[in-house]
Image (cartoon, grey):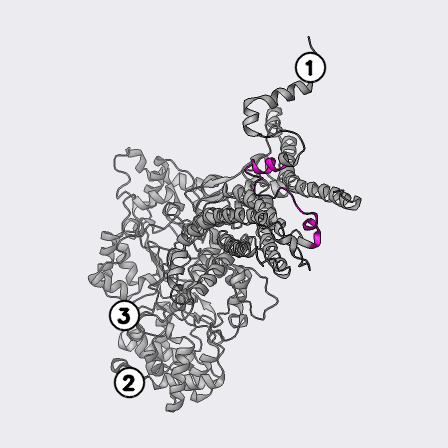
Amino acid sequence: MEIPVPLRRLFAITSILFFVVLAISPLKNALRPYRSIQREYARLGAARAKSQKVAQTYQSRSVAIQQIWLPGLQNRVDRCTTCHLGVQDENMAGAPGVFRLHSRSFHTPKDFDRFGCTSCHGGQGLATLEEDAHGHAENAGSPMTPLPFIESGCGRCHTGEQVAGAAILSKGRKLMEKAGCFSCHLVKGHEGFRSEAPPLESIALKTGGEALKRWLKDPKGLDPNASMPNFRLADADIEALTHFIFNTKPSRLLSEKVSSAGAEKLGDAVNGKKIFAEARCISCHTLEGKGNGSAPELSKVASRATQPWLLAFIRDPQAFNPRTRMPRFGFSEADTRDVVAYIVSEFKDFEAPPDMLNPVHVNQTLAEKGQKLFRQFGCTACHTSDAADRIGPELNRIGDKRAASLDFGKRKDVKHTLPAWLQAKLEDPRSLGQGLKMPAYGFSPEENRAVVTALLSLGAEPVPDRYQHQPATRASLVPGGAVGALFERYRCLSCHQIGDKGGDISTAPLTAEGSKVKKDWVAEYLLLSYTIRPILTDRMPVFRMTKEEAALLANAFETFYLDPSIPEDPFAGQPASSRDPAEGKHIFDTLGCKACHIQGEKGGYYGPPLNEAGRRLKPGWTYSWLKSPQRWRADVRCPNYGLTDADALKLTSFLQTLVQKPNSAKGGGR
Amino acid sequence: MSTFQLSTLTTWIRSSAVYRSIVRHGVADTNRNRSLIIFENLFLHVHPVKVREKTLKFSHTYWLGGITLVASFVLIATGILLMFYYHPSVPQAYRDMKELMFVVDNGVFYRNMHRWAAHLMVLGAMLHMLRVFYHRAYQPPRQFNWVVGVILLLITLLLSYTGYLLPWDQLAFWGVSVGTNMAKEAPLIGKPLRFLLLGGNIVSENALLRFYVLHCVVLPTALLLFLSVHIWRIRKDGGVQGPPEKASSDEVES
């Protein structure tokens, strides 16, 4: 059979086309971008090289895919170094774009081979094309973590609350705790979290109908320190909730405390003012914005809380709210009356209507409606005395959630990435869909960034044990018995830290307190505390504890809170010359310690005055501190002078000679 | 020395014992030799010795069966290459897919060839069936080959379906979840069938392994077997059936 000519031509053309098509794939393979990038790197490296020999090693590099393989870390394979060839190459400091040297950090350059790249930066380590690797291509897999949130990578291994060197992450984690995220959302490590919010039963005793309505409308508007978010409630819902709250019956114990306090006469406001200042309430509270801000603003408190309640609450805050951070002061009955007299005379909203604190006449129908709303909005998550009622989704894997599985609702202005979604969610939680319940927390942009960083650190896959870094915790932080009861009563851990637990108000952790300060000094200080560092505005309150209590605590520090690496007597076994205070004085002057510390009449205000150093500090501690201040407090500004043992000891012996009693004018009364 | 001649070499090769054991017929262009070429070759013997010119007309076959056959050969070739890089295990399967796309030389090409050839094979088989149906080629004596063809279509669809799970991505997972849930609704045998197919009650690593074995061993073997029968029967049934003709005398064959 003769094949017609047109058919033969068709056959010829398609055959040629077929071979061309077959050639495309090998060609694409040969022209992969990383090849030219590697050649460019060799050229650049040779040009920057300091010697001919180094230049030759650059030129003789073979073009090949580079990778860091970590079988022990989720079998990670990071091929980022196929293009980013200069990350570990000192020769590439300041080199342009893709070749530049990785900035120095705690883990770089030493830990590249331990962590690879994607464990911090995210993205697709396996890929060898930019848009795949960085995750910008469609369906490329999860994209890289944007640099503003890079500290989320630290948090994958560092699961503790505070991570040294990762300020944003630490701030975010602290904010999550403060905002009470864990009340509604389950997060690993925070299963036992309980909100500090007061139980409902005491609210009707505390406040009035109008005041409560104003509070529900906008808690942060009334009190910038409030941790309660804005639920954006409608007026009708606020009405119903108010009726529900006033319908809950307080326990007999509490109502008796309040009613008996109501029968008392008003005290002396002038004396109250003195006690208020001495106790230093603003170490936690604020007054018109001045103060620490980790407890409620007090300037209008008398228009939010009734006088009898204030009296009963200050006498025993922990009875009203077992989880409060407020200590139970040792004020006498009369002293408390005076303080409350001062509060109700000064801390008032003078524009508020006089019926602010009148109780509500409960309407049962509204109260029942309010009860439903109370559940519906998830108020029970924080305001219950038993286990939390978590109504939000678990957040344990949120950091690895794919953008494709997120609901952006009608928001067109939000980028389709996880960090952008989280930011939008925190800014305006209910804008991302209908029927959402999450309230608005009113985070500032920096706080928002910190919380998003903390959320992104919650990865789907747990990091293997040997990569996990958890701060060492002591088995028993707080002793039981009488000492434990004092810790509870005075709420030491609201401000101080022991191990990695505790508040952040104080800059003095108690973990090694017994090795640090002398017992007699502590016992005195607990009775009448004063500012140790002049630059700080917060100082320990004067609790009005008894001498016996102070002695008990001082004993406990001396017995339990010790650091075995601090010697009790650093001079033991050292030559007699090491005890020479005169030489120590010389070192003291040479180093310029007076720039920060007051000694004698003069000195700086940054560090603690040293005139009483010998009364306050133990020599072992002083010596250990001088050897390496940062070992004891990572963020301290006191320079590490790299003193020899002998010099540190001489300086210690000089400081031990300074035993002046603190000026009483600087005492707690100020 | 005598000059070297090609003909003496070819004569020497042709007279050697090895050559004669492979090619058992003469070189003469006779009908007998033409038949022997076909009969005595394992690979050719399923083909007809003679093909009617009219059955090669484009309007008779649209080359649909041939396209399907070529697609299946492409699939076997690329599939074997893909098997070098693929582990049917949960932590590895999707990752291997990425490796194939990111670093394996021509990996994207092999994977895409496999995918598109699979689409082509399903499409070709369907159209081939329609063509046969509208040409009434299912009528005797080809009724059994129609049945074989239907089996082949089923095998093709099953191959396509089992291959769908292997990338172990979301699409695969939910595709197989939905598919096997539909199978579960079949009366009586539904639930045991699903259990057997998945090696459990959920789409898990067992399902992945089973689908892999089905996709790479069981179904291709069955396909090759039925394909051989199918093509062999074409010859036995007198070649390809074109559009129905008025006179049907030449279709009668033993």
Which stretch did the figure color magenta? B34-59
Q: Secondary structure at mark 1?
A: loop
Distance of label 3 from label 1 (alpha carbons): 123 Å
| Viewer-side residue, A64 vs A558 | A64
First in sequence, mark 3 or 2: give its number. 2
Magenta region includes residue B38: yes
Disc 1: CA contacts within 10 A as few (<14), some (14-19) or many (>=20): few
Q: Are discs 3 and 1 both within one chain?
A: no
Image-quadrant location for residue A345: bottom left
Residue A425 coordinates in the image, percent (x, y): 52, 67
Nearest the eye: A647 or B106: B106
Residue underneath mark 1: B4
Determine whether A295 is above or below A8 in the image. below
Q: Nearer the viewer, mark 3 or mark 1?
A: 1
Do pointers 3 and 2 mark residues of a single chain?
A: yes
Q: Which mark is residue A236?
A: none
Secondary structure at numbered mark 2: helix
**Circle 2 is placed at which residue position?**
A259
